[in-house]
Amino acid sequence: MIKFLGLFVLSVFLVESAKGKTHYHKFVVKSSSYTRLCASKDILTVNGKFPGPTLKAHRGDKIVIKVYNQANTNITLHWHGARQPRNPWSDGPEYITQCPIIPGKMYIYKIDLNREEGTIWWHAHSGWARATVHGAIIVYPNKLGSGYPFPKPFSEIPIILGEWWKKDVMEIPSNANKTGGEPILSDAYTINGQPGFLYPCSKKGTFRMNVLQGKTYLLRIINAVMDENLFFGIARHKMVVVGKDGLYIKPIDTNYIMITPGQSMDVLLQADQPPSLYSMAAAAYSSALGAGFDKTMTTALIDYSINATYSSPKTPYLPNLPPHNRTEASTAFTKQFRSLATKDHPAKVPLDVDTFLFFTISVNLLNCSSDEKCTGPFGKRFAASVNNISFVTPPVDILQAYYHKIPNVFKMEFPRKPPVEFNYTGDNLPENLLTPSFGTRVLVLEYNASVELILQGTNVLASDNHPVHLHGYSFYVVGWGFGNFNPKEDPSMYNLVDPPEETTVGVPKNGWVAIRFKADNPGIWLLHCHIERHTTWGMNMVFLVKDGDGPTSGILPPPHDLPKC
Ligand SMILES: *[C@@H]1O[C@H](CO)[C@@H](O)[C@H](O)[C@H]1NC(C)=O
Ligand SMILES: *[C@@H]1O[C@H](CO)[C@@H](O)[C@H](O)[C@H]1NC(C)=O
Ligand SMILES: *[C@@H]1O[C@H](CO)[C@@H](O)[C@H](O)[C@H]1NC(C)=O
Ligand SMILES: *[C@@H]1O[C@H](CO)[C@@H](O)[C@H](O)[C@H]1NC(C)=O
Ligand SMILES: *[C@@H]1O[C@H](CO)[C@@H](O)[C@H](O)[C@H]1NC(C)=O
Ligand SMILES: *[C@@H]1O[C@H](CO)[C@@H](O)[C@H](O)[C@H]1NC(C)=O
Ligand SMILES: *[C@@H]1O[C@H](CO)[C@@H](O)[C@H](O)[C@H]1NC(C)=O
Ligand SMILES: *[C@@H]1O[C@H](CO)[C@@H](O)[C@H](O)[C@H]1NC(C)=O
Ligand SMILES: [Cu+2]
């Protein structure tokens, strides 16, 4: 009886504490002047900062953010990697789960951090605003839990990889759409807002990380770049990757990482080299044949001078990053991901799948209408699709249309498999496969469905590594491969023991991945490629996950301040 009481008291205590703390923040979205690459320009920021403020919380906490739009453009914010249980109203993608916050208005976002732990991030989900409107979210282990699954680092630092255009970012998509060609390429990449010493006028501002020799640092690396996968490395230092997308993984020792737009990685860096000045650097991994990309390299410094003297090298040591098109290097790194699968961090892989889905993801071309002059390949216009449907953004958000039963905003029956079977990764595919169809369709999932989804890259116009991000969920990557998915043979090779749990997965160039998740978060959830030009061209689709029967398995009611269209 005493034992029973003790347990009872303990469990009440845990439940109380598991509720955690609520953190309140005020975000003011506004235009601010920044000078980079020898020129000043106005960019959208939060609270005047680029990158924006870092949010910090413990697992089990809540964050409430009051967002004031003092810019002259519509805005929404997304909390990337936060599952937002039962609360799609706070998820953010414009015209998917909310109407934008128009200039002069305010909206309150709420985040419930009950599962994610590590580094996630926030960014605008409205036009191309996320280029400058983004920041880190650090989720520390729950105070009552077992702490980090690795030795506590001496110190930590967000490393946010970004992309800089001399021109106004907000005008890029509409300008590109005038001719149907590629959006203009960026002029620089950035580390914590700074291009680094390899670019003109950038030496002075180069981001500098001061280290004490012998100490271990936790780098919270976020790829907030718009259009490119990146290789990242640190001169003469090894890195140990211990987390990805706000979930721990088994440690990976490596000289470089490949990180896609949308992904975040927790990396341990031991300052174990002779005191000197070293660079960390990032450059594109771009594998699509014929695609233009920014070929520059961004750098930041690791400086041992806090308590050591050294004679500076003429130029700080640079890491050797793989060549831009080295898919083998990308694969050699990413194939190592495994989840911890321990008692404290179990892998709950769905084993009895009842819902099988197969999506092709393609870059497409459209014929140019007779009155325009298109500058895409073959004088055509770019498009992109999932299962041959190029997503059309509706005028009212899908979530409100679903909740309030507003007709004619979206259609059901998003295809569960490709409408046409072909050699997805074949060379010289017939031209009639190039053109997609268009629509705003959702795929309906039963509450608690146990889903397996094959994401199949195609070679329709050109194959590429597409970083696919699913809102509202994390998923287990149980398999991957090059070529076409083989439903007879490939499932026998799945890792159902310790597959990595992720929220953004790079689908290999001309290859596939198999992901599994349990559809236990009701709502409207976007799935899309995190390469911004592909999203702009239509590489998106939407899940509608039905409410469950129980009182706590339906979506929450809409908040009172929800923006209207
Ligand atoms: C892009 O241009 C095409 C053709 O001119 C037009 O039909 C379409 O609505 C435009 N899309 C956007 C998002 O502006
Ligand atoms: C610098 O600080 C580190 C960590 O406290 C210490 O191990 C190291 O010996 C110091 N180096 C010098 C030159 O004082
Ligand atoms: C990668 O680029 C190099 C140089 O630009 C080129 O020679 C090589 O053929 C390319 N490799 C692939 C696999 O495209
Ligand atoms: C696109 O144009 C080509 C060449 O003019 C034509 O053969 C083809 O049928 C057109 N495709 C569509 C979908 O209209
Ligand atoms: C698909 O295309 C690839 C590359 O061209 C080729 O090697 C393979 O044999 C093709 N598969 C089938 C079933 O035709
Ligand atoms: C996609 O749909 C278009 C229009 O219905 C059709 O012409 C094309 O062949 C389809 N392509 C594929 C790969 O299914
Ligand atoms: C959903 O699945 C969980 C276990 O995975 C179970 O506890 C719950 O009762 C299920 N809910 C419904 C409505 O089926
Ligand atoms: C901003 O959002 C409102 C509400 O949805 C919409 O009517 C308006 O067209 C949007 N403005 C722009 C420039 O997209
Ligand atoms: Cu893509």
Image (spheres, rainbow, N blue to C red):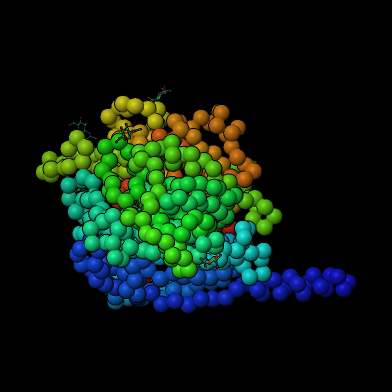
Corner quadrant of residue 188: bottom left
Instruction: Say whether residue 493 is visible.
Output: yes
Left or right of 245 on screen, residue 42: left
* x and y percentages locating residue 307 in the rendered image: 48, 68
Find the residue positioned furthest to the left: 371
Left or right of 72 on screen, residue 260: right
Q: Residue at x 62, y 60 (%)?
A: 151
* x and y percentages locating residue 164 in the rendered image: 28, 58
Q: Residue at x 57, y 69 (%)?
A: 58
Residue 97, relative to residue 324: is it above or below? Answer: below
Instruction: Say whether residue 75 is visible.
Output: no
Q: Which of the image's four quarters has the N terminus?
A: bottom right
Q: Residue at x 49, y 55 (%)?
A: 273
Left or right of 534 on screen, residue 504: right
The foreground one among 113 and 162 is 162
* x and y percentages locating residue 226 in the rendered image: 33, 54
Residue 148, relative to residue 527: is it above or below? Answer: below
Q: Which of the image's four quarters has the C terminus?
A: bottom left
Corner quadrant of residue 163: bottom left
Q: Residue at x 26, y 43 (%)?
A: 292
Residue 7, relative to residue 344: is it above or below? Answer: below
The foreground one among 507 and 145 is 145
* x and y percentages locating residue 500 in the rendered image: 56, 47
Find the residue positioned furthest to the right: 1
